[in-house]
Structures are given as C-alpha cells and as structure tokens.
Image (cartoon, rainbow, N blue to C red):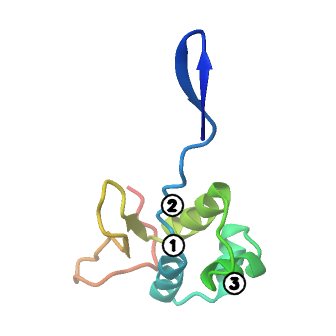
Amino acid sequence: MANYRLYGQFITMGQPENDAILSPALCRAARGYLDWTQAELAEASGVSRSTIRDFEGERHGVHRATEAQLRLAFEKAGLSFKGQNSEEPGVYCPYRGDDGRTDLSTSHDT
C-alpha cells in the first residue's frame, strides 16, 4: 500500500494487507477433516498439487485468488471457516444431521 497526495488530500492506493484466513496449518486441518489428499484438494479447487504442497509446507504463501479457490473447494464440501473479526482461526462443519453427527456426504441446500 502506498500513500499519495492528490489535490491536497492523502489517498491510499494499492491492495490492502493480506488478511488471509487460510493458513498452511488450517489448510492441512481442513484436508484432514475431509480426509482429502493434496491431489484431491487440487482436483476440487483447480490449484496445482505442487502449489498446495509448497503452501502447506510453508515454502511460500498463496495469492488471494488461490486462497479463494482453496476455500471455495472446502466450503463446497461443507466446511466453514472462522477467524474474521479478531476470532481465533478455525475450520468447522456447520451442518449436523438429525442424529447429531456431521454429515458431509449429502447436499444440504434448501
């Protein structure tokens, strides 16, 4: 982000700081929750397995668009993320079946 003076006023230009919710550890946790391999996440998200491997191994971060693809794949599988608004980051499954168990195998659209 850069601050510029324009017509006597300061304006901020550029992209905001990355307030990423999906950390490498959270990505691994979400995959574990779904019992997905990196290859299965790659197929579901359209992100290469090597990018997922490097991100989870903390070799490099990911772009916001890549994070969005990963999160969308997890969310389509039934997971939700928390961590915005100063909450502790986490992943959970908001849907519980009639028996109280988490069920990720069926569609929950109403």
Of 60 and 75, which appears nearest the observer?
60
Residue 31, position as x, y percentages in the image: 53, 83
Where is mark 3, residue-wise?
A: 53
Among numbered discs 3 and 2, the one appearing first in the sequence: 2
- Residue 47: quadrant of the picture: bottom right
Of 89 and 8, which appears nearest the observer?
8
Residue 72, position as x, y percentages in the image: 56, 62
The CA distance from mark 1 to mark 3 is 13 Å
Where is mark 2, residue-wise?
A: 20
- In this image, 12 relative to 109: left or right? right
Q: Amino acid at mark 3?
A: Arg
Where is mark 1, residue-wise?
A: 23
Disc 3 crowd, CA 10 A, few/some/many (<14, 14-19, 20+): some
Question: Which image quadrant: the C terminus?
Answer: bottom left
- Residue 46: quadrant of the picture: bottom right
Q: Is residue 39 above or below residue 3?
A: below
- In this image, 36 relative to 110: left or right? right
- In this image, 40 relative to 95: left or right? right
The CA distance from mark 3 to mark 2 is 18 Å
Which residue appears at 60% of the width and 67% of the height? 70
Disc 2 crowd, CA 10 A, few/some/many (<14, 14-19, 20+): some
Q: Secondary structure at mark 1?
A: loop
Which of the numbered marks, if any, corresponds to residue 2? none
Which residue occupies the extreme top position in the image?
7
